[in-house]
Image (cartoon, grey):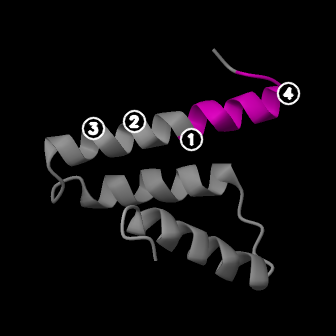
Amino acid sequence: MSDTYPMIALFEAQAEVLDAAGQRTSLDDAIVKLAAWMGLTQDQLSDDDMAILAEVGAIMYRDGLARRMGGWAK
């Protein structure tokens, strides 16, 4: 794993595992998993954690919407 971005390396390794297993989870599936997990753990997460995760979810949602619409969502 990269010393600078170990979580990026973790994401890459997990993506390879999913590919090897033939897993075709979509961006929408990831958004649902993130939202469900955030809902279950909101009492344990700080406000800063929730804000960052909500931003990540928003970016994923926006990108997914753009893909569904065949262009860039505004």
Q: Disc 2 marks which amino acid? A: Glu
Look at mark 4 in the image and give the residue it sits on.
Answer: 70
Q: Disc 4 marks which amino acid? A: Gly
Q: How many marks?
A: 4
Q: Earlier in the sequence, mark 1 or mark 2?
A: 2
Residue at x 68%, y 38% (from the top left corner): 64
| x, y percent for residue 45 | 18, 54
| Crowding near the residue tagged with mark 1, few <14, some 14–19, many ≥20 C-alpha atoms within 10 Å | some
Residue at x 78%, y 67% (from the top left corner): 24
Mark identifier at residue 17: none
Left or right of residue 34: residue 74: right
17 up-or-down from 59: above or below: below
| Part of the protein shown in magenta | 60-72
Look at mark 3 in the image and give the residue it sits on.
Answer: 51
Q: CA distance from mark 4 to mark 2?
A: 22 Å
| x, y percent for residue 4 | 37, 62
User: Is mark 1 in CB contact (under 8 Å) with mark 2?
Assistant: no
